[in-house]
Image: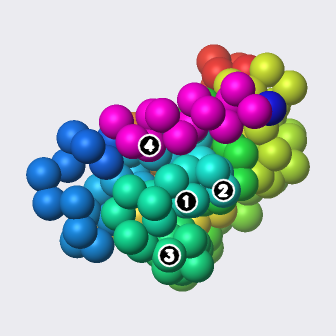
Amino acid sequence: MMEEEASIRGRVREIVAARPGRGRTELLEVLHEVQKAFQSVPRAAAEEIEREMGVPVTDTYGVVTFYDLLTDKPTGRTVLRVCEDVTCHLKGSENLIAAAERAIGPEGQPTADGAISWTRCACLGLCDKAPAAQLGEQPLAPCTAADVAKAGERNG
Ligand code: FES
């Protein structure tokens, strides 16, 4: 555990050092890179950001909880996001959510091998092709229950 924490802190120092500004304006970019590296923003990362950038841990978690793409909970290496906003809801996002539960498991819980997890999310900006989802960085729109099942198989 200590080793893992040391490696998180070391990686965060590298990420911060690579950003020229180092101020609060860099925080979102740094958090995206931390999320990409660890599939979440762990506590040790937030503490290291405070040390390196002077941004208090509470402010970092304020940002993490505000943005859908960031999380402090462990996720799968790939995250399936299923939009449940108004347009997608009207177009049957509940079917996608049920398919995700069947194919991957409970929301927010990575599969045993850590390959994938899924989460509901707000509008992905793909309303014209609703219902929409996003697998990692890849948009799935319109998305079907079969697409969700395939994502679970491919990544599980
Ligand atoms: S409401 Fe789902 S993509 Fe906009």
Q: Residue at x 47, y 65 (%)?
A: 50
Q: Which residue is mark 3?
A: 56
Q: Nearer the viewer, residue 138 or 90?
A: 138
Q: In terms of secondary structure, where does tag 1 sit?
A: helix
For the record, the magenta segment spans 2-14
Image position of 85 with respect to 153: above or below: below
Q: Secondary structure at mark 3?
A: loop
Q: Residues within 10 Å of mark 4 (few under 14, many from 20)?
A: many
- Looking at the picture, which amino acid does disc 4 mark? Val
Q: Amino acid at mark 3?
A: Pro
Residue 147, placed above or below residue 52: above
Dot 4 or dot 2, earlier in sequence: 4
Q: Label 1 to label 4, Cα distance in Å?
A: 9 Å
Q: Amino acid at mark 1?
A: Ala
Q: Are marks 3 and 4 in contact (CB under 8 Å)?
A: no
Determine which residue is flagged by label 4: 12
Q: How is the image coloured?
A: rainbow
Q: Is the residue under label 4 in contact with that under label 1 (CB below 8 Å)?
A: no
